[in-house]
Image: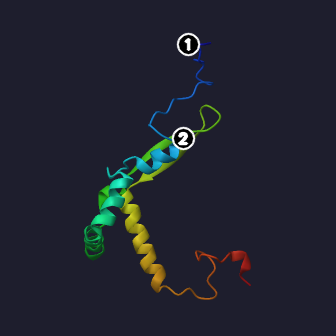
Amino acid sequence: MADDDGGSTDPKKSRPKRDHGGSEDDAKEKSSRADGFPADYVALVAKKDPELLTTAFDTVMREGEYPQMWKKADVVLIPKKDWGNFRAIALLSRLGKLFERVVAARIKSIWNASPNQYGFVKGRETKEAS
């Protein structure tokens, strides 16, 4: 079967067209996420007014409440080679991801892993444990 432009109309052979003005990687980096902030905006705020993000993150830590907006994700289905097979990815809040990186860096800076700790420690593998 073919449509007017010569392409296939067989649903098993045709694939949805993506038009986001760039490559898939560009779309991942430039698109807004669940929080509505494009990556460029978050990077600009971090560069121009880091105190704004610091104050926001400190407030989250002090009050102990993670913003609901940061918990939401946009789920996108990425088609695989075979029609009908998809890989789901969750696009998380950029601010939430940045906050989690800051917290992880703070924890890593003060955490001293036991020499017997292998799981969840960068550069160590459980197969090295004796």
Relative placement, left or right, of 86 versus 64 is: right
At label 2, counting other C-alpha atoms closer than 10 Å, the crowd grade (few under 14, some 14-19, many 20 or more) is: few
The disc labelled 1 sits on which kind of residue? Asp
Question: Which residue: 61% across, 38% down?
Answer: 80
Q: Position of residue 48 (x, y in %)?
A: 29, 65
Relative placement, left or right, of 113 versus 45 is: right
Q: Quadrant of residue 45?
A: bottom left
- Which residue has dot 2 on it? 78
Query: In terms of sequence position, does the residue under pointer 1 or pointer 2 come before the other?
Result: 1
Which type of secondary structure does the marked residue at label 1 adopt? Answer: loop
Q: Position of residue 72 (x, y in %)?
A: 36, 53
In the displayed structure, 17 sits above or below 33; it is above
Q: Quadrant of the N terminus?
A: top right
Q: Position of residue 21 (x, y in %)?
A: 44, 37
At label 1, counting other C-alpha atoms closer than 10 Å, the crowd grade (few under 14, some 14-19, many 20 or more) is: few
| Farthest residue, direction front | 48
Q: Quadrant of the C terminus?
A: bottom right
Q: Quadrant of residue 105?
A: bottom left
Relative placement, left or right, of 46 versus 25 is: left
- Which residue has dot 1 on it? 3
Which type of secondary structure does the marked residue at label 2 adopt? Answer: strand
Q: Nearer the viewer, mark 1 or mark 2?
A: 1
The number of discs equals 2
In the displayed structure, 15 sits above or below 29; it is above
Residues at discs 1 and 2 in contact (Cβ within 8 Å): no
Q: CA distance from mark 1 to mark 2?
A: 24 Å
Q: Position of residue 58 (x, y in %)?
A: 28, 74
Give the colouring mode of the picture: rainbow
